[in-house]
Each structure stands twice: as C-alpha cells, then as structure tokens.
Image (cartoon, rainbow, N blue to C red):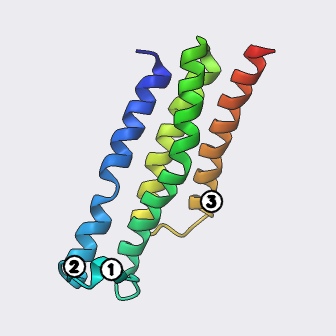
Amino acid sequence: MTPELWHLFLTSILLTILWIPHIVGQVVTDGLLKPQEYINLRDGTKSPAWVRRANRAHVNLVEQFGPFVGLVLVAHLSGISNSATQMAALVFFWARIAHALVMLIGFKHFMARTLIFSVSFFALLVFAWQIFAATM
C-alpha cells in the first residue's frame, strides 16, 4: 500500500468517527430524536457551542474528503507517487486531525482553525500539481 493510500485510509477512519461527538452531544443535550424531528430535523440552536463545532468539524472534513479521495485515486491509478505526493497526503491527514481538535475544543487564538484548514487545502493543491506535472 502506498503512503498516499495509507493516509486516505486513515482519513476515512477519521471521517467515520468524527460524527460521534456531535451525535453524543445532541442526544445528551436534547435527548433522542422524536418522530416529527425525523421530518423537520433539529436546527441545533439549543445545542451547546461544542456540539455545533463538532458538527461543523465533521461537515468540513466531508467537504474536503471528496477532493482528497479523487486526487489519491487518480495518482494511484496513474502510477504517480513521489515524495511530494506522499508528504501532501501526510500533511493533509495530520492537518485534518489538528483541525478537528481545534474545532472540538474551541481554540480561538492565532486564527488556528483557518490556518490549519489552509494547510490542508494547500496539501491538496500540491497533490494536484504533482499529478498535473507528471502527466505533462
């Protein structure tokens, strides 16, 4: 297994478990869903801030997961793997871990959340550039 696929696997696990804090917080705060809430959904306004942040951390990873999967699979199927793609996958994974932690604990200093998101986005750009450059 290439390092890129390994980090895709680890990111998949992160995505798989990242919804748990939100759901646990929602159930602890508001109880189990009532039948009507399956139709109308909860708006989350009664939930504490950490529950809303947990949901946002999960949604944010969902938004970046698609591009990461696409880039890793295109690179893998094209036989493109080098130190830059390996580092980009590693950086993306650890940046997403850091992003989730910063979101969950509510760390508000140094624009940490935005900076960490930007690092993970930059890793995607590096990965994409490596694929582009290898095919030219």
**As displayed, is residue 131 above or below residue 97?**
above
Mark 3 Cα-neighbour bin, 10 Å: few <14, some 14–19, many ≥20: few
Q: Residue at x 77, y 19 (%)?
A: 133
**As displayed, is residue 5 above or below residue 23?**
above
Mark 1 Cα-neighbour bin, 10 Å: few <14, some 14–19, many ≥20: few
The first of marks 1 and 3 along the sequence is 1
- Per the image, the residue denoted by label 1 is 39
Q: Amino acid at mark 2?
A: Leu
Task: Please identify the residue farthest to the top as the structure is shown.
Answer: 79
Can you give x and y, in whole percent of width and height, for residue 105 in the image?
40, 66
The first of marks 1 and 2 along the sequence is 2
The first of marks 3 and 2 along the sequence is 2
Q: Can residue 81 be seen from the camera position used here? A: no
Q: Amino acid at mark 1?
A: Ile
The one nearer the camera, 40 or 80, is 40
Label drawn at residue 33:
2
Q: Residue at x 43, y 55 (%)?
A: 100
- Per the image, the residue denoted by label 3 is 114
Q: Residue at x 65, y 50 (%)?
A: 118
Q: Quadrant of residue 136?
A: top right
The one nearer the camera, 94 or 32, is 32
Q: Amino acid at mark 3?
A: Thr
